[in-house]
Amino acid sequence: MKNKLFTNFHWDSIILCEVIETEGNCMAVCYNNLWKLLIDKRMNKTELCKAIGISSSTMAKLTKEEYVALPVLERICAELDCNIADVMEFTDLDKVKEEMNK
């Protein structure tokens, strides 16, 4: 049995979408840009958690490319002095569109 959660945040003209499936992998967001940025800033995940006041479970969600709340992403951007595109990018949007149209 598949468990699907659709979440949409309308932020300017960007729609942040996520599809979670218990069977299979259909993720629409990727945080690889964040990990590259942390390396460039010579900061590790634990230091970022402490600096912005997030839990290790929230960091685990980021590591697993799972949904995190927009205010978490805002705090990351404020701490690292960057924009949201510097932290995340969208992937597999075609799969998300297919799931949304079912």
Image (cartoon, rainbow, N blue to C red):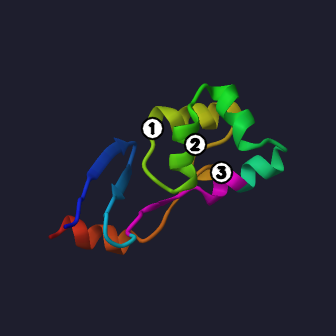
Which sits in the foreground, 9 or 102?
Answer: 102
Label 3: few (<14), some (14–19) or many (≥20) C-alpha neighbours in 10 Å:
many
In the shown orientation, is residue 17 left or right of residue 50? left
3D distance between C-alphas at marks 1 and 3: 14 Å
Residue corresponding to mark 1? 70
Horizontal and vertical percent position of residue 50: 68, 27
Q: Give the range drawn in magenta.
A: 26-35
Mark number, residue 78 = none
Which sits in the foreground, 85 or 3?
Answer: 3
Horizontal and vertical percent position of residue 3: 23, 59
SS at mark 3 in the image: helix
Q: Earlier in the sequence, mark 1 or mark 3?
A: 3
Point out the frontmost of discs 2 and 3.
2
Q: Which of marks 2 and 1 is nearer the N terminus?
A: 2
Horizontal and vertical percent position of residue 31: 58, 55
In the shown orientation, is residue 89 left or right of residue 52? left
Q: Earlier in the sequence, mark 2 or mark 3?
A: 3
